[in-house]
Image (tube, rainbow, N blue to C red):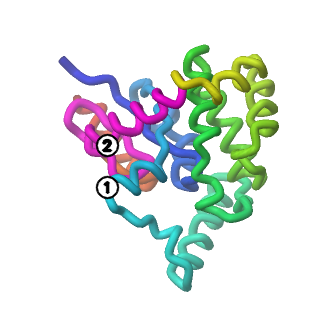
Amino acid sequence: MPVEPTFYYDFSSPYSYFAAHRVDEVLPVPVRWQVILFGGLTSTIGKTPWSLHRGAERDRRMRECEATAAELGLPLTWPPDWPLGTYSMPAVKAALVAEQFGRQREFALEAFRRGLGEGDDLTDLAVLVEVAEAVDLDAVAIEEGVESPEIRARTRAVTEAAQARGVTGIPTIAWDDHLVWGFDRLGEAAAGLAAR
């Protein structure tokens, strides 16, 4: 039986930010949005993202991201201490609370706008509450949810499930036994899904 197509993302990734604004437009079928804790995944699989290697190559890629954002008409403001400071467990947990209300996508888009768009701190619960309120989610549900053992366990579970499925980078579009990783490969994912 076909597995539901899934869009894996994390709030620290500029490529996830870009993909979040194109995935529903480019892909020929609806996909399930699935936030994961990318910092946890990379730690588990022993991968070091380019963003953690300070130097000329990192600077070049950051300038490329800025150019891509401009092409897409998106603001891009690097938050302080990016990316380590933006591997935000609270933001992932808040998105999983939003998922319980059927609003993970809406929460994610607003969180991206506030985080990578405006440079706000998504580890700050007050910011996450403002994000939730902007998409008509209950502030108390977010505040209580990010502290709940159930959401902490869910954060671990969705990240482990992504790893078990073979996800090693984000954004990834996954369906059946296919994985397509990268914002620049959304067209490839679209073609694959159309031929499914």
Which of the 4 quarters of the picture holds residue 176?
A: top left
Which residue shows up at 63% across the image and 66% down it? Answer: 67
Which residues are the magenta region? 151-179
**Outermost front residue:** 149
Q: Which mark is residue 163?
A: 2
Question: Looking at the picture, which amino acid does disc 1 mark?
Answer: Ile
Q: The C terminus appears in which quarter of the rendering?
A: top left
Secondary structure under tag 2 reads helix
Of mark 2 and mark 1, the one earlier in the sequence is 1
Which one is in front, 9 or 151?
Answer: 151
Relative to 30, is 5 on the left or the right? left
Residue 33 can be seen, yes or no: no
Image: 63 above or below 72: below
Q: Image check: 139 left or right of 38?
A: right
- SS label for mark 1: helix
Question: Given contact means CB atoms under 8 Å apart, are the residues at marks 2 and 1 in contact?
Answer: yes
Name the quadrant containing residue 21: top right
